[in-house]
Image: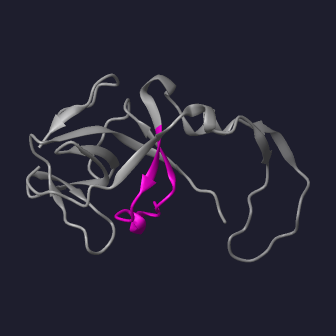
Amino acid sequence: MPLPHPSRPVVVPLSRRDDALRLHDVPFELVPCEVPFFLVHTQAGFPSPAQDDMQEPIDLGAWLVEHPAASYIMRVDGRSMSGAGINDGDMIVVNRAKKPKAGSIVVALVHGDRTLKRLRYVDGRHWLVPEAEGFADILVDEHVEIWGTVVGVARKMA
C-alpha cells in the first residue's frame, strides 16, 4: 500500500459502499491552549490518597497535535467505531504525516464520502473495518483515499 504524503491523500483500493460516517472539520483554534497538569496518576480502580503535586500547565493542543502542518481535527458523526472507543460527537486528531499501517484507525474517502475505520490486512488485501455491529467491511481499492491516521480522541463528558 502506498505511503501517505503530508500534503495529499494516498489512493488505495474499495468495492462496497459503507455507512459513510460523516466527519466535520474543527478549527485548531477550538483546541484549549493550557490546563493544569497533575504529576500524580489518578486511579481508575481503587481510590488513592489525594496529593497536591502539580507540574507546569500542559498545552493540550501541542500534546495532541504532533505535526500541526500535517494534521487536522474532525468531529465524528456516527457510531461505526464505538467498539474502538470513538463515539458520535467525539473529536479526532488526524495526522497525515503518520504512515497508516495494519491496525491503525484511519480517515478515508470512499467514493467521495469520508469515513473512519480500522485498517486491516487480511489474505493479502487491505480492508477498512468498522468496530460496531451492523456496518460492512470495505475492501480498499482504487475508489478509496486514505486521508490520515487518527492519533488522538477528545470527548467532553456530560
Q: Quadrant of the C terminus?
A: bottom right
Q: As drawn, is 120 to the left or to the right of 25?
A: left
Name the residue: 89% across, 59% down.
Answer: 51
- Does the segment drawn in magenta span residue 88? yes
Say which of 24 and 102 sits in front: 24
Rendered-image quadrant of the N terminus: top left
In this rendering, position of residue 6 left or right of residue 138: right
Kindly give the residue lying farthest to the bottom in the view shown.
Answer: 46
Residue in the image at 72% along x and 68% along y: 43
The quarter holding residue 129 reads bottom left
- Seen in the picture, residue 84 relative to 45 is either above or below; the reply is above
Question: Of residues 42 and 13, which is closer to you in this image?
Answer: 13
On the image, the x and y values in percent for residue 63 come to 61, 37
Q: Which residues fall within the magenta stretch? A: 73-92
Residue 108 seen in render? yes
Residue 20, quarter of the rendered image: bottom left
89 or 122: nearer the viewer: 89
Which residue is depicted at the point 68% across and 70% down? 44
Rendering quarter of residue 148: top left
Q: Position of residue 92 (x, y in %)?
A: 48, 47
Outermost residue to the right: 52
